[in-house]
Amino acid sequence: MVVRQYLKWMEQAPAGRRAEAVDPLVRAYFIADVSEREREAMEAAMTILLDDPSPDVRRALAQSLARHEDAPRHLIIALTQDRPEVAAPVLARSPVLLDAELVDAVATGTDMLQQAIASRPVVSPPVSAAIVEVAGPEAIAELLRNAAARLGLHSFQRLAERFGDDAEIRTLMFARVDLPIVVRQALIRRMSERLGEHAARDSWMPPRRIEALVRDACDKATCCLVAGAGEADRIALVEHLRGTGQLTTSLLVRVMCAGHMHFFEAALSSLAAMPAPRVYSILAEGRESSLRALFARAGLPERSHPAFIAALDVWRDLDFDGRPGDQYRFSRRMIERILTRYEDFTRSDLDDLLTMLRRLAAEAAREAARGFVEEYVRTPETPAVTAREGLGDDAEDADDGYAGDDMDDGVFEDGRPEAVAA
């Protein structure tokens, strides 16, 4: 009887009033203590509302039903086929919809509907993959902002391919804690290349100098990635760098100077095709003949062997002190000791490596100075010292280590880094 009266009233009421009356009907359907026949009548009434000429009424029905996991399936499916503003609430929230139905909606829907699906409380990997393949930047941004969206490695790689030059998308990708390290590095490389292209158009620097700066910036950022990588990430990053021709001698020198022994171990294990425990034992033992044999098997240039051997010797003698900026102080100490150990070598033997190490020393000196200043500012009770007393010989060392624009920026022979064979 109540449903009959409701339907008669709906025939006469204006659209606004009809829209307001939808939610009470839906709530009564789910929570009212009524007979089975009365409940069937309510479902029939909701089905009739699918044909209401006012989209406001149908949207109200979609909003009310989207909250319920036991909503009548035929109503949910029908609403997903309606106008975008009607379908969006259901696609955004309804737990009734299957992944396959959501994938179809992504493939055929408007950007508004794709954004709605991307904002769901849970977005499964297949649905995320569908969005990544066909959606525009607005829906992609919504997906990346959704912490409950699950994306696999392939989806992140496709995002990097499709939107690697979009600053907003790139920023959102970097903000994701689940962004694989290999994709982070790929984005870094792409950013470096685009900066190089921009510099080539607008800069006074010669192309070779720009190429060296871009490569060096990419190596420096990659070294930062290595610092926080776990074992699985290190192995994945090594294979990625090797496959893309970025696992160069210059990168390995930088990594060693930063003290990232575990990455160096993983790289040698891959390049030499030897088990990691065996590589570690050779590195830890430190016998020069064994080290040279390992480096040769890994394909490292022979003239770089002394630098790596020195780095290993120095690494065994040093450790982080745990203070702010210690990473760069550690790196600087390593580089300086390597330089000291090999200062008697002829420049013809170590000229290119010496250039690179001096430049790395200058970088480390500047970063160590920044760390000192930050620490000094945070501790005002520390007795005042002059810049010369506080920094010691940092400034002189940095000046001595500066390679200058006429140098090859730490690359070997022909201006290109020597890539280790993939």
Image: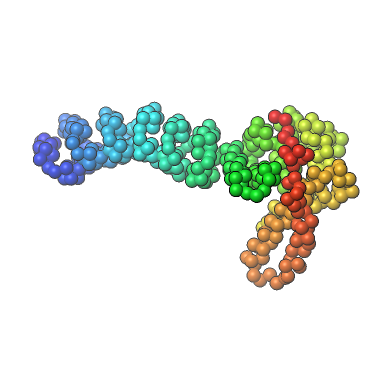
* 26 vs 126: above or below: below
Instruction: Report the residue at 25% width, 40% height from top.
Output: 59
- Do we see residue 292 in this rendering? yes
Horizontal side, residue 169 vs residue 187: left or right: left
Instruction: Report the residue at 51% width, 33% height from top.
Output: 158
Horizontal side, residue 154 vs residue 238: left or right: left
Q: Nearer the viewer, residue 329 or 42?
A: 329
Q: x and y percent of residue 284 in the render?
A: 79, 40
Q: x and y percent of residue 183 in the render?
A: 57, 38
Quarter of the image that includes the C terminus:
top right
Horizontal side, residue 402 vs residue 126: left or right: right
Q: How many numbered marks, from 0 up?
A: 0
Horizontal side, residue 126 vs residue 271: left or right: left
Instruction: Report the residue at 52% width, 43% height from top.
Output: 170
- Do we see residue 178 in this rendering? no
Q: How is the image coloured?
A: rainbow
Q: x and y percent of residue 354 in the render?
A: 81, 47
Instruction: Report the residue at 74% width, 66% height from top.
Output: 390
Quarter of the image that includes the N terminus:
top left
Q: x and y percent of residue 159 in the render?
A: 51, 36
